[in-house]
Amino acid sequence: MNLARRAAMLIGAAAVLPLVIFFAIQLSFASRDQRRLVESRAMASVETLIVESDAQLSRTLGALDALATAPAIRQGDFALAYRRAAEIAALNPDWVSVALTDLSGGRELFDLRQPYGQPRAAVFRREPLPAGVAERAVVDGIGGSGRGCPCVVVHRRVRGPGGRDYLVTAEVAQRPFQNLVMTPASDPRPVALVDSHGRFVARSVRPEETVGGNPSQSLRDTLRSGRKGGIYASRTLEGFVSYTAFATSRLSGWSAHVAFDPTLIDAPHRRSLAATALAALAALLLATALIWFTLRQLKEAGRVERRIEEAQKMEALGQLTGGIAHDFNNLLTPIVGGLDMLARQPGLDGRPLRIVESALNSARKAAKLATQLLAFSRRQNLEVRSVDLPALIANIEPILRQSAGAAIDIEIRVDPGAGCVLSDPNQLELALLNLVVNARDAMPDGGTIRISAVPLPAREGSADVELRIADTGKGMPPDVLRRATEPFFTTKPPGSGTGLGLAQVYGATRQAGGGFRIESEPGKGTIITLTLRRCDDPPPPAVPTRIDTKPAIQPERRILVCDDDDAARTFVAHSLEQSGYVVEHVSSGRTAVEAARNAPFDLVVCDFAMRGMNGAEVARRVRALERPVPFLLITGYADSDALAGIGVEIPVLRKPFDGDTLAQAVRAALGDG
Ligand code: ADP
Ligand code: MG
């Protein structure tokens, strides 16, 4: 993912976060508002019910007060009181009956249901009488007896003649209260009025069975708790689970109850909970994503920075070593030349000659080093051209296998699309050889080397091919990885590593316009990736020079190859074998002289700058043998000028060279060309 897209995502996430929180709060507020609305509507309806029933009751109480305080009872004229009661009852159609009881005597004086003067057995309505009944008419509750009931009972106590107490009781039809609570028959949730004794005065559902009876447990519990109003969770007599709003009348002590659908409260509540939970989750996710993105961004930035630092370091190293190597190369040319001339001075022998030769030897090695440094600093002479990569790999494959040894498998996979690349073919072969040798050294107990070439998707007009060499070796710890491409950096014991392998690969690849990358972890192997520029034109078909030369070769030409550099030696030996020669190879000057003494060779091909005895010395000794052998000296870029002084006796092949050039030089040296 590129930086801009990631930044956009970051900004997007940061912008969305407050939005999510805002909507969650909004939703939870909306849910709460909705719940409050439902509750306040229910409360309003119970309060209305109380107001209406109070109005109904006040009329009755007022009429009873008027009757009870009329002079008739106080004067003890009960017949008159009976007539007055009948008049008031006629004016109030809901009045079912009026009765007068002599509380002191414990007997009923009259009941409008009976004609006056037919006294009945003493019937006490209710004991104890409601509080305040002596000062005003008070509501008792649902009750009554006889025709026209259930009734609502109201009382008023009065003092009569002789200080006796009388009780006037009116029984009023329940019907008007029933009318107050009626709801559509389809509504299963009850509306009810409950008296102060806890009995239904009126109920919208099943009134015939429930009026006068006891309400549900939840309702009774609520009344017993002493609360005067509010909402409670209820379970109706019919078993409906509901919420019920209730309010209590101050006038009568009655309460009104309206049950409503619990989902009206629960659903918004659940919704607001769910919204909050969801928002919390979304916020958490977003925050996690933000943190993750930021951390990745930081890590990526760190990686980029490190990569830039690496590149700058390599660049600086390259410039430094390049400059030094170039100057050294120039300085070494006259040194080598001068020493060489000195060494040839007639009459110089013994100790002085040995000193000069040893100085010459060292100077030549220094020159060889300078060449390798020039390769790293990308200042060598490169011949970048179109190269048929699959062909190049196929060509060098046997050398690679031979260098890797039997314990190591080499798997090669070349994508058909990775045909033509821009490179110096000799340097590229050398790079492959260097990388395979490194991989081999990292796998002392054997393993697998995978070489692959894959075209990359074209980008901004240029297309690349990735050439990858992966091994299953011991890998590199970070400090080695950081320095691996530095020239002379090696972890190998003295004598087995020069520290110039990766420097060559890096330098040559970069100079040819390609890229270089190492991925490695201890224990996980190493992957080295060269990014090579792809070319459109297929390279000119390779002229099969080596095959052409074959018929010209005499059978059984034996060549001794000597080079202390494994990669170079293997390359030369293999090339010559391909051209049909019988090749033996050795890695030091001393063994070369030995071999040439002991077996017949048609030619010795020897590198010039070697540890110990150098090429020129080998040549001198081989020629001094009883049976001298023709000699071909291989020299580097830097020693070329120095060697000019050696003279014509030794044919020289200049590095870098390819297989064809080598074959030509060998033919010439053998006298076959
Ligand atoms: P040399 O091989 O002479 O040591 P190079 O420049 O080729 O020099 O490599 C430098 C160092 O990088 C090696 O000494 C080694 O520690 C490390 N290295 C290179 N290639 C590999 C590899 N394939 N596996 C593990 N380590 C490697
Ligand atoms: Mg190496």
Image (cartoon, helix red, strand yellow):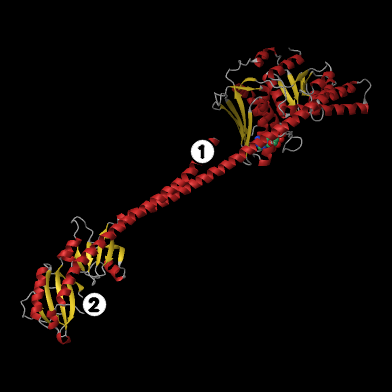
Q: Examine the image and state in which quarter residue 574 appears.
A: top right
| 133 relative to 397, above or below | below
Q: Which mark is residue 212?
A: none
Q: Which mark is residue 8?
A: 1
Residue 40 appears left or right of 452? left
| 84 relative to 343, above or below | below
Q: CA distance from mark 1 to mark 2?
A: 80 Å
Number of disc labels: 2
Whole-percent x and y of residue 580? 68, 18
Residue 638 visible here: yes
Give the mark nearer the N terminus: 1 vs 2: 1
Q: Residue type at mark 1? A: Ala
Mark 2: few/some/many CA within 10 Å (<14, 14-19, 20+)? few
Residue that mark 2 sits on: 132
Q: Secondary structure at mark 2?
A: loop
| 403 relative to 83, above or below | above
Residue plotted at (17% across, 70% down): 60
Whole-percent x and y of residue 659? 69, 19
Whole-percent x and y of residue 582? 71, 21
Q: Is mark 1 within 8 Å of ligand 1?
A: no
Q: Examine the image and state in which quarter residue 433 appears.
A: top right
Q: Residue type at mark 2? A: Gly
Mark 1: few/some/many CA within 10 Å (<14, 14-19, 20+)? few
Residue 242 visible here: no
Nearer to the camera, 379 or 198: 198
Q: Secondary structure at mark 1?
A: helix
Q: Examine the image and state in which quarter residue 396 appears.
A: top right
